[in-house]
Image (cartoon, grey):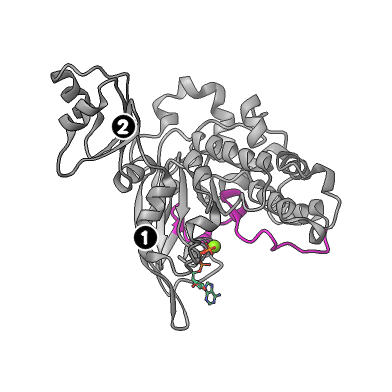
Amino acid sequence: MVFDMGDPFGPCPVEQDRVALTADFDAFTILTGRFLDGSSRGVAAYRARQRGGPAVPRNPAAGRYLGRTRTPTPVRSVEDMITAEGLTKRFGDKTAVQDISFTVQPGTVTGFLGPNGAGKSTTMRMIVGLDKPTSGRTTVNGKEYRRLRAPLTEVGVLLDAKAVHTGRTARNHLRAMAATHGIPASRVDEVIDLAGIGSVSRKRAGKFSLGMGQRLGIASALLGDPHTLILDEPVNGLDPEGVRWVRQFVRFAASEGRTVLLSSHLMSEMAQTADHVIVMGRGQVLADAPLDELVRAWTTTTVRVRSPRVADLASAVAGADVEIVSTSPESLEIVGLPASRIGDIAADRGIPLHELTPTNGSLEDAYLALTGESVEYRSAEYPAKELA
Ligand SMILES: Nc1ncnc2c1ncn2[C@@H]1O[C@H](COP(=O)(O)OP(=O)(O)OP(=O)(O)O)[C@@H](O)[C@H]1O
Ligand SMILES: [Mg+2]
């Protein structure tokens, strides 16, 4: 079988280090290979396994989250990304998405953030061909979604968890999906297990609670063991166990080299899950940056200091741009000077320090600062005393 990685950035790792990869080569070829005859990786994989192809090694950690392991994608390829170029979507006179461009890299979890109505779902729908762009282009794995031969095995999508045939049981819904791609029933059972819906899989999906529907949507997204995951608010409605499971499985998927784009309004959850974030507001990209860079750029760093001579320290660091708040007789919070500078000033004056702790703001602080102008649906503010 001729194997073509088609990597534009470097030599094919299989050619480069064939010996080192020998043990995993079969699994690697079967699960990630693109074949020169143009057939898609996943379908070939399933057919090969159905024919009794080489067993895929199991790894307990992988088994917990994705149901199987595969050799991590060893090199980045433009074909493994999601791209958007000059993407615009208008609904009548409403511009939902306006000339946005970005790439979503493999091997990372990219968080897709933005206020209600910012255009996140519309963008995701365009990526997977459910909405046609008014102008611009979007690709997955180097191709427009509609040109993918076996989309389920390339892109796992969770958009509207309620988009299931309500009269079918969860198992039959998944089996019907699987049948379109030659995916075996054993994989259906596997994703049912992974998503934790075993006990209700023979119930009609129309009777599912919000969280169970969401789990079924996640099971559908995982069905084809895809390289790319596009998940619109996957934790919406999930219980804490489910929220943690989604976090762990997307982190694990990224660690295997998969491409993950997920939206959520839960900033504390996103802060633990994403490496990179794209923030939208009123149809435009407001920020596209590593998560920690975004937080650093959009929040102020407060330095907590404890010293038996806080008054001396306060007068030593005082300045036009320095804000000092006394938090106890022995501690201060200082904004406007880095911790290193405060430490140096204290050392110069022989002031003992018992604590010097810089604290960044949170992702929520950064997000609110960044999107403040872009919120279309603003809630009324409660007077503070009513909350007390
Ligand atoms: N089919 C449609 N017809 C008309 N307007 C639409 C349609 N779909 C989306 N819109 C509008 O496009 C804008 C972007 O909506 P979208 O659902 O993409 O936002 P979102 O960022 O996903 O918001 P949320 O956080 O609330 O899910 C909104 O103003 C919405 O009303
Ligand atoms: Mg949405």
Q: Residue at x 71, y 51 (%)?
A: 211
**To which residue does mark 2 refer?**
332
Q: Quadrant of ligand 2?
A: bottom right
Query: How dense is the environment of label 1, judged by Cα within 10 Å: few (below 14), some, or many (20 and up)?
Result: many
Up the image or down, 251 lies above or below 101; here it is: above
- Which one is nearer the viewer's eye here, 79 or 241? 241
Apparent side of residue 383 relative to residue 235 in the rendered image (left or right): left
Q: Which residues are magenta?
A: 139-168
Q: Quadrant of the N terminus?
A: top right
Residue 242 drawn at (x, y percent) = 67, 42
Q: CA distance from mark 1 to mark 2?
A: 38 Å
Label annotation for residue 285? 1
- Which one is nearer the viewer's eye here, 167 or 214? 214
Q: Which element type, helix, strand or loop, lies under badge 2?
A: strand
Q: Residue at x 56, y 50 (%)?
A: 154
- Which one is nearer the viewer's eye here, 48 or 24? 24
Q: Given the image, on which type of amino acid does mark 1 rest? A: Val
Apparent side of residue 20 relative to residue 345 in the rendered image (left or right): right
Up the image or down, 164 lies above or below 67; here it is: below
Q: Residue at x 68, y 28 (%)?
A: 55
Residue that lies at the very extreme toward the bottom in this rendered image: 92
Q: Given the image, on which type of amino acid does mark 2 rest? A: Leu
Residue 322 drawn at (x, y percent) = 20, 41
